[in-house]
Image (spheres, grey):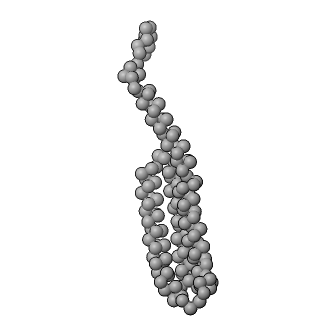
Amino acid sequence: MTLPPWEYLFTAFNSFNFHDLFYPIVVSSIVFLAGLVVLYNVRTRQLRKHPPYLDLYEWLLWTGVIMFGLLLIYAVFVFDFVFVISTIVIGCGIFVWIRFVRFPPQLAAYETKLAKARYFSRMKYAKPEATIRTKSSKRSRRRR
């Protein structure tokens, strides 16, 4: 380190200036981007009948595509390091906000709705007589 820490913010982000951070950030961006795509495909197939969970994974996917895509663009086109740091901080903040602030109320409401549906379904068929049709006293016959 030959410069004060705040001057590294306005230094070009390349493998020469940031030899210890450049390749880990680029490789982890590629790995996380591929992992997000795989996770999104697997979880949306598993939860295709549960819309709030699909929305959650879609938000996470697009946030990850934008964040990790920008990090790769910064590495290829040699942006200043301040953009890399700000993208990582803002992207991680958005991930945390999506997972722990935005969607928990929606997921809790959906779980309550599913629990009520299971309860009423169970109550509807709790008595065996509920599934047997009652015979009417007068039976009308149709002629064909």
The x and y percentages for residue 114 are 48, 39
Q: Residue furthest bottom?
A: 2
**In the image, what residue occupies the spot 46% across and 78% down?**
24
Q: Nearer the viewer, residue 46 or 88?
A: 88
The x and y percentages for residue 144 are 42, 16
**In the image, what residue occupies the spot 54% across and 61% down?**
96
**In the image, what residue occupies the spot 58% across and 54% down?**
102
**In the image, what residue occupies the spot 47% across and 46% down?**
49
Q: Nearer the viewer, residue 73 or 2?
A: 2
Residue 143 visible in the current orientation = no
For residue 79, which quarter of the picture? bottom right
User: Measured along the vertical axis of the image, is residue 139 above or below residue 9?
Assistant: above
User: Measured along the vertical axis of the image, is residue 10 above or below residue 46?
Assistant: below
The x and y percentages for residue 74 are 57, 78
Q: Nearer the viewer, residue 80 or 142?
A: 80
Q: Residue furthest front?
A: 4
The x and y percentages for residue 29 are 48, 73
